[in-house]
């Protein structure tokens, strides 16, 4: 079983995944269909952005669910089930409810104002739907996860570790996601937000993420061995999807491509990112508040930049910089206000604003 709680690579992957989410959301504003999903959309499109967007779209959200399941494993190490549920209630459910009533309505209002609609108050999960799902998964899987923790030498625990230390485990993962796709029949496959597809796909990824770290070094050494094979398969299937199938790609090919991208990220992260730094410590703590706030600053930046007469690529960069700048400036304020911190998923007591050393632990507040 995984015994070390120092897994910098998983924390790096979480930070990178949230960074990709921000970039992806900025890119939506430069697609002609952006307004259909309530984004402020530039009249000047950047069509070529769709190629990297469609590559990311089949694995960026599932990756976050995998990481969230891994985070629960590490959070359990020094907590019983009551402590875990209490901690997750304050770190996930509270920011979700706060955001539903106080954050999402703000960027909805900005969208209404930009398109000269009648202003109205909308309490809605919006981009925070992910948090609601994660909290439900924690509640659902806690009995099983704590059973495995208490019986790490039992047959079930040993069986999980053995299976996921071989490629057979990955075949089971792919099979489960294919079955979900065949039963739910999502179209497009990438429609995750507030859908049954997103719920069950997230649940599978959350569960398997836990299993991956629970299995210990055997899993990580196995994916490290085959990492280049996963990359080749993912790239090949993406090219086939892009050039041949387009929107009609069979679900089993999308699943295989998605899982190969995800396992590749974990394998290369395990090899190259398993080291801590002050930068990681800072970004790991900032990632959650940045995720919660980013749509407000994205919409504010879009509202201003889209009215400027300049090259679309410069507009993209400006919106991205405004979004990041606004989020991190807000984080600098939030992390210093004791009673505000919990609303953004941070512990009430900041302890020290600067880390004591260059080392860090895997962030157990992973979403």
Image (tube, rainbow, N blue to C red):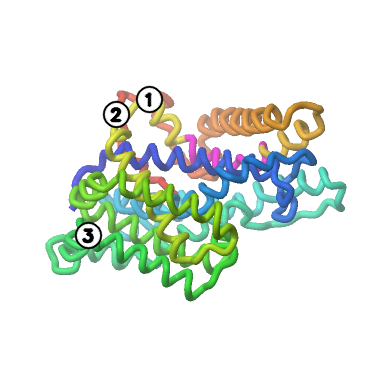
Predominant SS along the magenta part: helix
Magenta region, residue range: 286-297
Q: Nearer the viewer, residue 337 or 25?
A: 25
Between discs 1 and 2, the one toward the N terminus: 1
Farthest residue, direction front: 244
Work out whether 51 lies above or below 189: above
Q: Which mark is residue 11?
A: none
Secondary structure, mark 2, is: loop
Residue 92 relative to residue 154: left or right = right
The Cα–Cα distance between marks 3 and 1, rounded to whole angstroms, is 31 Å
The Cα–Cα distance between marks 1 and 2, rounded to whole angstroms, is 8 Å
Work out whether 21 lies above or below 143: above
On the image, numbered disc 2 is attached to which residue?
359
Indicate the quadrant where residue 237 lies.
bottom left
Between discs 3 and 1, the one toward the N terminus: 3
Work out whether 104 lies above or below 270: below
């Amino acid at each position: 079983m995984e015994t070390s709680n120092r897994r910098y690579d998983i924390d790096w992957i979480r930070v990178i995944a949230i960074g990709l989410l921000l970039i992806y959301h900025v890119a939506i504003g430069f697609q002609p269909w952006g307004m259909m999903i309530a984004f402020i959309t530039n009249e000047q499109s950047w069509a070529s952005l769709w190629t990297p967007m469609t590559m990311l779209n089949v694995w960026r959200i599932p990756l976050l669910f995998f990481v969230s399941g891994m985070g629960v494993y590490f959070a359990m190490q020094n907590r019983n089930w009551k402590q875990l549920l209490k901690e997750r209630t304050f770190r996930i459910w509270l920011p979700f409810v706060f955001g539903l009533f106080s954050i999402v309505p703000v960027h909805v209002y900005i969208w209404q104002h930009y398109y000269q609609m009648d202003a109205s108050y909308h309490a809605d999960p919006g981009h925070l739907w992910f948090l609601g799902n994660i909290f439900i998964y924690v509640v659902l899987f806690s009995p099983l996860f704590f059973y495995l923790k208490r019986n790490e030498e039992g047959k079930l625990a040993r069986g999980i570790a053995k299976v996921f230390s071989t490629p057979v485990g990955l075949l089971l993962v792919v099979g489960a996601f294919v079955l979900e796709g065949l039963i739910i029949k999502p179209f497009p496959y990438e429609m995750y937000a507030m859908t049954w597809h997103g719920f069950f796909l997230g649940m599978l990824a959350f569960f398997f993420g836990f299993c991956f770290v629970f299995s210990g070094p055997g899993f990580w050494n196995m994916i490290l061995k085959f990492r280049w094979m996963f990359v080749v398969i993912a790239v090949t299937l993406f090219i086939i999807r892009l050039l041949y199938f387009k929107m009609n790609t069979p679900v089993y090919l999308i699943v295989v491509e998605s899982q190969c991208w995800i396992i590749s990220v974990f394998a290369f992260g395990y090899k190259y990112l398993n080291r801590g730094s002050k930068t990681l410590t800072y970004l790991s703590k900032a990632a959650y508040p940045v995720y919660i706030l980013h749509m407000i600053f994205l919409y504010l930046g879009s509202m201003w930049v889209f009215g400027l007469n300049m090259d679309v690529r410069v507009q993209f960069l400006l919106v991205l910089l405004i979004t990041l700048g606004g989020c991190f400036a807000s984080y600098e304020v939030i992390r210093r206000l004791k009673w505000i911190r919990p609303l953004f998923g941070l512990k009430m007591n900041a302890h020290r604003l600067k880390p004591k050393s260059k080392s860090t632990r895997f962030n157990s507040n992973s979403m």
